[in-house]
């Protein structure tokens, strides 16, 4: 066949490098609704749920049992279930119905009923729902801070710059697992250099992550994964109960925690039980709620390639974010994983969370070039900072970031590097040279930095764990190396665990270490003229992007 | 040109007919009712892999579809070559290798950990049929590892050889420099759907009662 030049041009477009697949409910490749999804139902006898979504109590798997026992308000169940799904869907969009009233209704519905409600909403209605149901009044943003070399100096510098740019939380992970304690310490130090009060976490294997948290080397945790089918839970050596226990372990030490889930994980692990991604994610979110954790990172997350590959997949992602908010959970709404070769498509996907605002629009945004993003690439990276700032300015939307100057960036990067250098020296870890700090200060990514002695780093990291180094040792190291102000900041972060207020739903800290959560600053949106508006000082900040024409110099 | 009503009707009908046919051609193919990717392989009579005692061995645990339903990684590298290179890497360091097929899990961390537990040295390697690989040690938590290579499309034979070498070095208790990480931030966009399909092929071949079986090369 002679080829059409038009079609050839289209075939070469970036979007056509993406993976797409037809709906296949038998294998779980279906976003919003599977013919095998159960019909909503509930029976209550003597204060116990005896039937849930068409299943009798004796046939419950452990997810059904956990959900029936802990995630649905039994005193509300019959009343809420009697309300037509369409009516609930309309109330979610209705500006006359308050967030509080919706939370009350939703507290009594089952996962299958939730699926029905969400299926009535198109994406604009979902965005309207999120605008009202988000827990915290002011939206927020989270960064990924990683690099290919697991270079602690770069982690500290990128964390400092990210904090300066406005991220309220920063998350790291490793290329080589045993680097975890170094990455955690570097992130803890760097974040406080950029802006006081930024929360940090290190996403690694759960037992290690918990230990880092208990030692005060991180200030929150996020990677407690839950799944929508029993098989996938068991394959991961877990149950809803073990996750609830892990959550309680963090809580016992005063650490903020959220769970993680998202569409496509069950498909990717080959155990979807023929159910839709939305239904399985609803089960995850009910387990999350039942486990008593304050929030969730969801929106397909690391399986977004699967969700985005099926029809209405991106709608489903926004749908599951909304379900989290409807259940009263803090929602860190993903956007943290690359899924498309097309700039147009990846931007469009993010607008669904960016425009209404979520507790954390990204979870997180790669605050380094994507080649250094060890979560296998985020949807936006450091090279998109200015685009993002312009989007905030164009639409007068608060996406959680702000423009910065080159001078500030260089200053905080250097200071973070110097602080890590001092702490490593004080604690007797591997050497950080002046030259290394300088290279990282001016670097864009790990291609611009010096090589580290990996084998020695790993031995020092193991040794650090064996010696029982804690956050208090980091404070001491900083204070005795002349970084008194920074030592004070990290001590303040440790104090949060005693105060405990930042364990409330959707909590972040301002630069004075004051909590802003869904409890003390709740979202009160009820239509035009209410809720959070971008005004005053914050609007001035957003307006001041670089590269504006200076009329006086024109 | 004379245009009469009859002609207009005839053209309209032809266009409508064409539209209907196009519509049918463009509709997504129906996968409804399809319940598996490949027929089930029989492991009748397979020999169960034994607990190792040789302190010099590294056990390589391959996925359930390895060299049977799947013959090349997601990046297109033949699995025969993958295995040959991992084994060569181990042998170059003076250690020995033993290959088993893991039929009770398709999770690469558990595959690697089970292989490590079976291994006389306590070091094992798990390799999924799509190419994802983990080096594990018997006394570590399941979801941690000595080295993990999560982005299978980026793997090459040189890396598989280095994996063999590093695994052998862990056996010897040497100070090991992990193989440098590689990262393609667009890997998910290009490969995740294919990865899901390959994992389905692997998972549907599981035969938990058989556990881990002796697997020396293709059959």
Image (cartoon, helix red, strand yellow):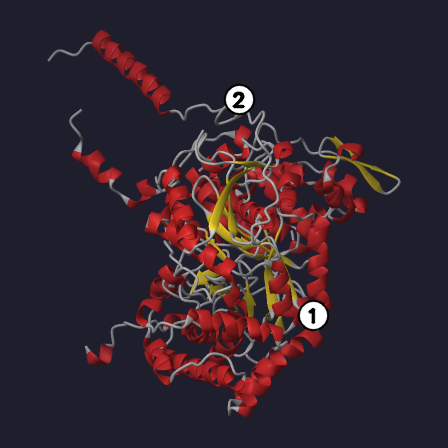
Q: Is residue A457 visible?
A: yes
For the point 64% across and 78% down, the residue is A494
Question: Which of the 4 image quadrants contains residue A209?
Answer: bottom right
> Around disc 2, counting alpha carbons within 10 Å, would you say few (fewer than 14), some (14 to 19), or many (20 or more)?
few
Residue A203, x across and y down, in percent: 55, 61
Place of residue A236 in the rendered image (x, y in percent of width and height, measured from the top left): 62, 47
| Residue A60 coordinates in the image, percent (x, y) | 75, 36
Residue located 47% across and 24% down the image: B31
Nearer to us in this view, A449 or B73: B73
Q: Residues within 10 Å of mark 1 (few under 14, many from 20)?
A: many
Residue A347 horizontal/vertical position (percent): 38, 52
Give the letter of the chain under mark 2. Answer: B
Q: Is residue A388 left or right of residue A185?
A: left
Quarter of the view holding residue B19: top left
Q: Which residue is mark 1?
A: A254
Secondary structure, mark 2, is loop
- Can residue A87 be seen at all in this image of the molecule? no
Please state the chain letter of the residue tagged with numbered disc 1 in the rendered image: A
Location of the C terminus of chain A by quadrant is bottom left
For residue A508, the mark is: none
- Is circle 2 on the same chain as circle 1? no
Q: Residue furthest left?
A: B1
CB-based contact (under 8 Å), mark 2 and mark 1 = no
Q: Is residue B26 left or right of residue A223?
A: left
Q: Is residue A206 above or below residue B78?
A: below
Q: Regarding mark 1 in the picture, which secondary structure is present there?
A: loop
Res. B33 mark: 2
Image quarter (top left, top right, bottom left or bottom right) of the N terminus of chain A: top left
**Along the line of sight, which residue is nearer the eye, A325 or B87?**
B87
CA gap, disc 2 to disc 1? 50 Å
């Amino acid at each position: 066949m002679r080829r059409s030049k038009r079609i050839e041009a289209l075939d070469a477009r970036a979007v056509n490098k993406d993976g797409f697949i037809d709906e296949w409910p038998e294998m779980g490749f279906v976003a919003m609704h599977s013919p095998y999804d159960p019909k909503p139902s509930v029976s209550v006898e003597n204060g116990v749920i005896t039937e849930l979504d068409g299943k009798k109590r004796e046939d419950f798997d452990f997810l059904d049992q956990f959900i029936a026992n802990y995630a649905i308000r039994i005193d509300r169940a019959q009343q809420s279930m009697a309300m037509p799904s369409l009516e609930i869907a309309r109330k979610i969009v209705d500006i006359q119905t308050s967030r509080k009233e919706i939370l009350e209704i939703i507290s009594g519905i089952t996962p299958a009923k939730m699926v029905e409600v969400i299926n009535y909403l198109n994406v604009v209605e979902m965005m309207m729902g999120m605008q009202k149901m988000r827990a915290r009044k002011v939206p927020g943003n989270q960064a990924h801070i990683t690099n290919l070399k697991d270079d602690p100096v770069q982690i500290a510098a990128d964390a400092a710059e990210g904090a300066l740019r406005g991220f309220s939380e920063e998350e790291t992970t490793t290329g080589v697992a045993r680097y975890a304690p170094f990455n955690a310490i570097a992130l803890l130090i760097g974040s406080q250099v950029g802006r006081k009060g930024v929360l940090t976490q290190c996403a690694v294997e759960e037992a290690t992550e918990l230990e880092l948290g208990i030692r005060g080397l991180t200030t929150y945790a996020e990677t407690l994964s839950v799944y929508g089918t029993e098989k996938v839970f068991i394959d991961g050596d877990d149950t809803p109960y073990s996750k609830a226990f892990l959550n309680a372990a963090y809580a016992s030490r005063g650490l903020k925690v959220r769970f993680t889930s998202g569409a496509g994980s069950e498909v990717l692990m080959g155990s979807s039980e023929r159910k839709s991604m939305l239904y399985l994610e609803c089960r995850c979110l009910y387990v999350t709620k039942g486990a008593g954790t304050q929030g969730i990172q969801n929106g397909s997350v690391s399986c977004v390639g699967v969700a985005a590959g099926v029809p209405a997949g991106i709608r489903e992602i926004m749908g599951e974010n909304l379900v989290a908010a409807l259940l009263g959970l803090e929602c860190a709404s993903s956007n943290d994983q690359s899924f498309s070769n097309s700039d147009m498509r990846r931007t469009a996907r993010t607008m669904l969370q960016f425009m209404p605002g979520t507790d954390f629009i990204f979870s997180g945004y790669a605050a380094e070039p994507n080649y250094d993003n060890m979560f296998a690439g985020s949807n936006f990276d450091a090279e998109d900072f200015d685009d993002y700032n312009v989007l905030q300015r164009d639409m007068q939307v608060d996406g959680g970031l702000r423009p910065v100057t080159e001078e500030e960036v260089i200053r905080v990067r250097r200071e973070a590097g110097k602080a890590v250098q001092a702490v490593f020296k004080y604690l007797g870890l591997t050497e950080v040279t002046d030259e290394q700090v300088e290279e990282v200060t001016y670097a864009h990514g790990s291609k611009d930095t010096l090589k580290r002695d990996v084998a020695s780093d790993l031995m020092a990291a193991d040794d650090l764990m064996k010696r029982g180094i804690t956050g208090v040792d980091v404070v001491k190291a900083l204070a005795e190396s002349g970084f008194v102000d920074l030592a004070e900041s990290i001590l303040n972060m440790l104090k949060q665990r005693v105060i405990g207020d930042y364990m409330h739903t959707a909590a972040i800290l301002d630069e004075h270490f004051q909590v802003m959560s869904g409890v003390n600053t709740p979202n009160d949106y009820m239509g035009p003229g209410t809720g959070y508006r971008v005004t005053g000082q914050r609007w001035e900040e957003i307006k001041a992007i670089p590269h504006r024409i200076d009329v006086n110099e024109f | 040109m004379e245009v009469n009503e009859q002609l207009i009707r005839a053209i309209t009908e032809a266009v409508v007919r064409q539209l209907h046919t196009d519509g049918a051609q463009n509709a997504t193919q129906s996968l409804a009712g399809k319940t598996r990717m490949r027929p089930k392989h029989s492991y009748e009579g397979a020999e169960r892999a034994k607990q190792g005692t040789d302190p010099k061995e590294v056990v390589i645990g391959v996925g359930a579809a390895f060299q049977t339903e799947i013959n090349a990684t997601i990046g297109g590298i033949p699995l025969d070559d993958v295995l040959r290179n991992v084994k060569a890497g181990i042998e170059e360091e003076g250690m020995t290798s033993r290959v088993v097929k893991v039929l009770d899990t398709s999770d690469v961390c558990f595959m690697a950990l089970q292989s490590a537990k079976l291994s006389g040295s306590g070091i094992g390697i798990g390799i999924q049929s799509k190419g994802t690989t983990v080096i594990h040690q018997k006394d570590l938590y399941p979801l941690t590892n000595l080295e993990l290579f999560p982005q299978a499309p980026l793997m090459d034979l040189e890396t598989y050889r280095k994996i063999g070498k590093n695994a052998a070095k862990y056996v010897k208790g040497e100070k090991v420099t992990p193989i440098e990480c590689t990262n393609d931030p667009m890997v998910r966009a290009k490969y995740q759907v294919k990865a899901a399909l390959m994992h389905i092929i692997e998972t549907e071949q599981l035969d938990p009662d058989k556990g881990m079986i002796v697997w020396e090369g293709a059959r």
